[in-house]
Image: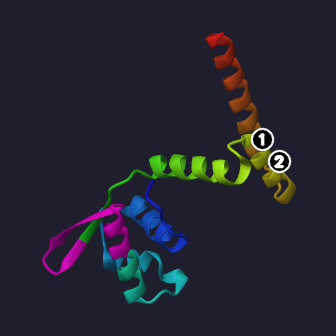
Amino acid sequence: MIEISDAELSIMHCIWQHHPCTAAQVIEQLQHKAWHEKTIKTLLNRLISKGALSYQKQGKAYIYSPCIEQHAYQQQASSSFIKKLFAGRLTPLVASFSQQHTVSADDLAALKQLVAKLEQEGKNHD
């Protein structure tokens, strides 16, 4: 899995949402972070070096596109996180989260549906 820092992940989120895009577009999208233009360009270059982004040169502009899909990265990163902090177990993660944050009625309903689906799939595999 490609290791992506929190700052680099902000860049990736922007590019996942708006690709292909130029550095100027990324800078505009991330203006709320008050990062210097040079910082953003450094992060873009790091992501290229890591293989997370590709680029094409068009005139004076560079056009950036993701080399990894957001969903695939989320799956790998969440799996790594759960293994590292919760010994690969999901229940302690959910319990810890629910102790620190309010779980919305929508999220609770979605979790119940997921559990029901998993239980049904388990019955089908027996």
Q: Position of residue 5 (x, y in %)?
A: 51, 69
The answer to whether the residues at label 1 and label 2 have Cβ atoms under 8 Å apart is yes
Span colored in magenta: 44-62
Which amino acid type corresponds to the residue marked 2 in the rendered image?
A: Ala
Given residues 125 and 13, the one toward you in this image is 125
Q: Which residue is mark 2?
A: 95
Left or right, 96 with respect to 113, comes to right
Q: Position of residue 29 (x, y in %)?
A: 44, 75
Asked if the stretch drawn in magenta spans residue 51, the answer is: yes
Q: Which residue is mark 1?
A: 91
Q: Residue at x 48, y 47 (%)?
A: 71
Q: List the single residue furthest toward the left.
A: 59
Q: Residue at x 54, y 82 (%)?
A: 33
Q: Residue at x 47, y 77 (%)?
A: 30
Which amino acid type corresponds to the residue marked 1 in the rendered image?
A: Thr
Q: Measure the C-alpha gap from mark 1 to mark 2.
A: 6 Å
Left or right, 84 with respect to 32, comes to right
Q: Quadrant of the C terminus?
A: top right
Look at the numbered disc 2 and give the secondary structure of its residue.
Answer: helix
Q: Crowding near pointer 1: few (<14 within 10 Å), some, many (20+)?
A: few
Q: List the single residue furthest toward the right.
A: 99
Residue 91 sits in which quadrant? top right
